[in-house]
Amino acid sequence: MTREWLDWEWVRTWCDQTEPELRRLMGSFEARHGFPPGENVITLTTDESNEATSALVDLTFPPSDLTTLYSVIRDISLPDVDHGYFIHSPTMTAEHFREYGSVQVAGDGPALVFASDGGGHLFAVAGTGRVWKSTAASPHADFEVAANGIQDFLEYLGYRIADQALDASS
C-alpha cells in the first residue's frame, strides 16, 4: 500500500475545522474546571517561521511531511487537551536536533523530534512519514509507532479536541 504524503491544503482545512472546536472547548473550560485554561492555540506560519523552516532544512534533511506541516502551521500549544499536546516550532525542532541529534526508531531509521505531550513524551517523524512516540520522557527512550503519518497525528488531535468540546457541551 502506498502512503499519500501530507498536503498543505489538507493542513489548512484541518486548521479551519479545528480552531472553532478549540474555541468552543476553551469557552466552557473555566466553568467546567474552576480555573481558566492555558493558552491553547494553533499558530499559523509567519515570515519568521518560514525562515526557521529553511534553516531547519539546511541543518538536517527533515521528512517532507514536516516541511509541509511547517508551511501552514508554526506551532500548536494544547496544554488543556487531554494531558497536553505541543507541536514545536521549526526553531525549537532545530534546537532539539542540535542538542540531541535525531532519534533512532526500530526499523524506520533516524527520526526528527517535532512534538511532545504534557508528560514530556516526545513525538518524532521518520523519513517514511510515520510518527513515533517515546516510551519515556527522554530522547534516549525507546519509541513506538503513534501514527501512520502527521496527517493521522493531526486527525487524532482534532478528534480529541472535538470529543472534549462535545463532552463540555453535555
Image: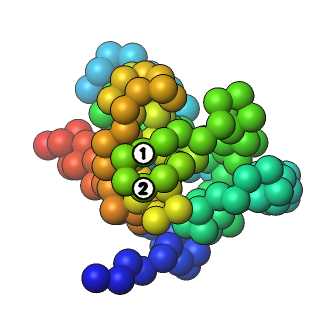
Q: Quadrant of the N terminus?
A: bottom left
Q: Which residue is mark 2?
A: 108
Task: Judge whether 157 appears above or below 67 on screen.
Answer: above
Marks 2 and 1 sit apart, C-alpha to C-alpha, by 6 Å
Q: Nearer the viewer, residue 29 or 46?
A: 46
- Dot 2 falls on a residue whose secondary structure is loop
Residue 65's mark?
A: none
- How far from the left and from the top, in percent, is residue 31? 31, 26
Q: Quadrant of the C terminus?
A: top left
- How far from the left and from the top, in percent, is residue 94? 73, 42
| Crowding at mark 1 (Cα within 10 Å: few <14, some 14-19, many 20+) | many
Q: Residue at 65%, 37% (x, y): give it.
A: 101
- Dot 1 falls on a residue whose secondary structure is strand
Q: Residue at 55%, 66% (x, y): give it.
A: 65
Q: Which residue is mark 1?
A: 105
Task: Judge whether 154 appears above or below 9 on screen.
Answer: above
Q: Nearer the viewer, residue 7 or 159?
A: 7
Q: Amino acid at mark 1?
A: Val
As drawn, is 121 to the left or to the right of 161?
Answer: right
Q: Is residue 104 visible?
A: yes
As drawn, is 34 to the left or to the right of 16?
Answer: left
Question: Mark 1 and mark 2 in contact (Cβ < 8 Å)?
Answer: yes
Q: How is the image coloured?
A: rainbow
Q: Residue at 50%, 73% (x, y): give it.
A: 6
